Amino acid sequence: MAKARSFYVCSNCGKRSEAFLGRCPQCGKFATMEEQVELTSRSAGGARDSRSAGKRAPQRLADIEMSQDTRIALPIAEFSRVLGGGLVPGSLVLLSGEPGIGKSTLVLELSAKLAATTGPVLYVSGEESAGQIKLRAERLGLSAPELYLLTETDLSEIISQAQRLNPRLLVIDSIQTTQDPALNSTAGLVAQVRQCATELQRLAKGSGLSILIIGHVTKDGNIAGPRVLEHIVDAVLYLEGDPFQQYRLLRGVKNRFGATSEVGVFEMSGAGLAQVPNPSEAFLEERVINASGSAIAITLEGTRPLLVELQALTSPTAFGNPRRTPNGIDLNRLLLISAVLSKRVGLKLWEQDIFVNVIGGLRITEPASDLAMALAIASSYQDRALPADLAIVGEVGLSGEVRRVGQLPARLNEARKIGFRRALAPKLGRRVSDLPEGIQLIEVRSVAEALRAVLSVDSD
């Protein structure tokens, strides 16, 4: 006979308590503890039975034999790149992003192409009907006889159909609509999301089935549900981009089987998300040559060098406190660069509004773009354009010094391939033998020296 057990879970942080509390002891929020009722007979008993049947003795690391399974080659190269070269059998991957960013479109395209090349794929949707998914597939020009659609939210039925079909890939769209009938709570709540993710993890690890989960995000941009969801899965991917721009970035923030922070670039079109094999050229194709306030930064996304355009605009302020408005960069980084230019170089930026924008809807977090930002601001302030064939890389310190960055040869090689003939970079403390030929390296030690080299701006 089933046994019911009540407990309380904070809807904000997922803190669990056996007794009702008016204020969550973990996050400090009031009136967030919600009652959950759990039926323990099936889930707890079944889980214990399955675990007890599969008990194993400890093994020495040297005696463990590696599986012969290799990664599943994905037909979308940019997706495969972010995962580290393909999909690992038995892995659990979480894909998240804002509503309307293109998650379902990208995953449906991946599912159809994978089903056409490697075998059956089961696409489970709890948000759309089979007819709606079929309509999208026709719009994208997708046709795969081995792609199976299932409109279901019951987790036990999903697992049953997956075990019967034995697909190469199982897609859950989305985890917030999936519900375990063993829990007497609404889909999307903390307990349901945690339980469903745990059961899917057991299915993946026990059968070797690869599972791709689509997750919603909150208004703050974080994945909805308990934070433990990101710890359960093997990889966490974000599909991000400016809704008013055509480019989308697939970014890996966690990957147990490869490097993190890898990025795949896609372009939104009427036929779905198209891969961008050379994103640097795409981001610079609308660049205006010899325009003041424009600088080309060489950033690094994971292991991929990208050239992006930073635009800055300075204007005399009409207010007591000048504004600092960034788009695509961190506000604190803009404040730091503005202070360095004012204090160490002598530019009177305290009476200027400063606007900085990263072209293409990208968001740059790497400090290696500091020097390019500083030069773009100085270029706009002096109303003098930077050389058109100059790419810039370097981190700026509080003393105005330019610090070295990692993987400089790879960055310079990317700039050379795009057609840049000069690069402004930090002073090298030692000889680097693998620097590419065909690009002139201008080495500087400080921001003031960099400005003198390219703009002839002297500090006071």
Image (spheres, rainbow, N blue to C red):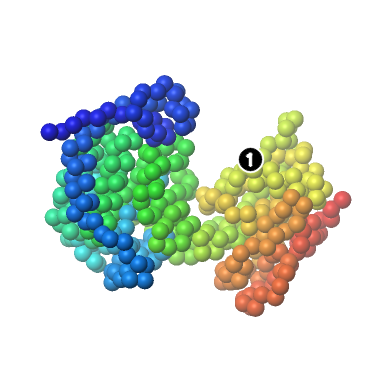
Task: Specify the farthest residue to the front.
Answer: 57
Q: Nearer the viewer, residue 357 or 330?
A: 330
Element marked by disc 1: strand
Q: Quadrant of residue 215?
A: top left
- Find disc 1 in the rendering and name its residue: 325
Q: Measured from the top left, where is residue 400 in percent x and y? A: 76, 53
Q: Nearer the viewer, residue 232 or 243?
A: 232
Task: Specify the farthest residue to the right.
Answer: 460
User: In the figure, 80 relative to 159: above or below?
Assistant: below
Q: Quadrant of residue 308?
A: bottom right
Q: Nearer the viewer, residue 105 or 38?
A: 38
Q: Measured from the top left, where is residue 452 in percent x and y? A: 80, 60
Q: Is residue 377 left or right of residue 277?
A: right
Q: Measured from the top left, where is residue 183 in percent x and y? A: 23, 35
Q: Residues within 10 Å of mark 1 (few under 14, many from 20)?
A: some
User: In the figure, 17 relative to 386: above or below?
Assistant: above
Amino acid carrying label 1: it is Thr
Q: Is residue 20 visible?
A: yes
At horizontal 81% and vertical 51% (from top left) the residue drawn is 345
